[in-house]
Image (cartoon, grey):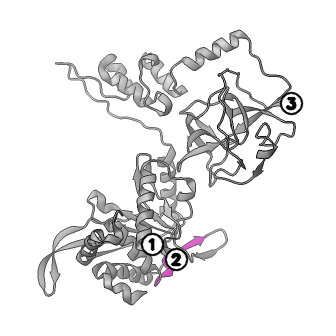
Amino acid sequence: MSAAMIKEFRLPDLGEGLTESEILSWKVAVGDTVALNQVIAEVETAKAVVELPSPFAGVITALHEQPGTVVEVGKPIVSFEVAGDDGGPGAGGPAPAETARREPNLVGYGAVVEGSGRPVRRARTFAAPVVEAAESTAPIVEPAETRAALTTAAERPRSTPPVRKLAKDLGVELAAVTGTGAGGLITRDDVRNFVGGGDLPAAAQALAGAEPAVSAGTGAQAPREVRTPIKGVRKLTAAAMVSSAFTAPHATEFLTVDVTPTMELLARLKASRAFEGLKLTPLTLVAKALLIALRRQPTLNTRWDEANQEIVQFNYVNLGIAAATPRGLTVPNIKDADRMSLTELSTALTSLTETARAGKTSPAELSGGTISITNIGVFGIDAGTPILNPGEAAILAMGAVRNMPWEYKNEVALRQVMTLSLSFDHRLVDGEQGSRFLADIGAILADPGMVLAMV
């Protein structure tokens, strides 16, 4: 009989040197039997929400971190009991007919199992957290007192230490609060909303950072300030924007264009059977115009490599699309967008935005962009000075399409007009190159037939 071993799994670097991640939810519990590469948790990095696969096949003996906890890379998060004496990640895994081979995956560890089998769940037991990996030749048995204590701990309302402290300071019983976080996790907002419902005195409501309930004649006021921890996407975005703004010398140019012909083309495409079922928008056509113009001005698709003192010229285009999501601003990119037809580009844009809004964008989709577009027009804005996505030479902001009086065939007519704003890294792009690039995009949008003269 193979010796049983306890193996720890430490939080890995989920991409590009990220130092921490937040445990959103566990997909397993203590006592569950899991297969190699089975999803065991959902974690949130500063870039994306990632499903964490198991590096071992075995039985879960301890979950070291609660949902809602921010964990540093390298810290143990879960322990497994595995069979075998070689300590390999496949120990305790499938039978010889289902052997696994090591293969890098999303987070750089784990293996692919040849063969499928549904995970087997056994009755849950509770084991004390394992700090160091240890060998054992017999099942772990906890005293009755330990099991009782752990059972009580498991049944208490799920929350994080900061939330429990906030509740204690406010005199709130967490058992009375309904958790809205992942898996029923009680968040700060849940506690604040509970307080804001008028169940506690106004002083306690102010301490919670929520607006006190207003009683007739009391004149209770909202708090003067509310503090929110800087973390996740907001933290990464802030650091990236500061680095970009103070590293790359930005220059921004503007061009206002009569895009009536492009909007008419968009209407015809939507009515065409060839594009039936596709979500075509002005962004689709602006993105296509940018990709075409980039062929004539490739210096806009470069990167400044400070460490090696080189300019990197990309012979492909990974088109970044700035997306406003519930987690904050992200810029996922469409790989090899320059090789796509208009139909393929439309499908890719739709998939990208839906994935981003669902918070499911992977780190790989957020890495490797070469040039970006931000659509500020959807917010009713005409123009701006966009900040470069770090590592890219240019970013185009497209403004709102507005009906405006415009000179047309030597007369004034009501036309559909858009303002384009182009920011570029002046180390890489000269004013002439940036101006010609912006003018080419404008020419295509003003007269889509100009594409025939450019390709």
Picture quarter with the C terminus: bottom left
x, y percent for residue 348: 45, 63
Residue 413, quarter of picture: bottom left
Q: Which circle, 1 or 3, is nearer the viewer?
A: 3
Picture quarter with the N terminus: top right
Cβ atoms under marks 1 and 2 closer than 8 Å? yes
Residue 69, quarter of picture: top right
The numbered mark, 1 or 3, whose residue comes first in the sequence reads 3
Residue to which mark 1 is pinned = 424
Q: Is residue 148 above or below residue 271?
A: above
User: Residue flagged by tag 1: what amino acid is it?
Assistant: Phe
Instruction: Locate residue 86 relative to residue 272 in the image: left or right.
Output: right
User: Residue flagged by tag 2: what amino acid is it?
Assistant: Leu
Q: Is residue 421 visible?
A: no
Cβ atoms under marks 1 and 3 closer than 8 Å? no
Instruction: Locate residue 16 relative to residue 338 in the image: left or right.
Output: right
The stretch drawn in magenta includes residue 299: yes
Range of the magenta residues?
A: 296-305
| Distance Cα–Cα, label 2 vs label 3 | 61 Å
Within 10 Å of disc 1 (Cα), the crowding (few <14, some 14-19, many 20+) is: many
Residue to which mark 2 is pinned = 428
Instruction: Locate residue 169 relative to residue 223 in the image: left or right.
Output: right
x, y percent for residue 412: 11, 80
Residue at position x 46%, y 27% in the image: 186
x, y percent for residue 136: 84, 26
Residue placed most toward the observer, 277 or 160:
277
Identify the residue at the far bottom of this view.
453
Identify the residue at the far top of this view.
145
Q: Which circle, 2 or 3, is nearer the viewer?
A: 3
Residue placed most toward the observer, 216 or 413:
413
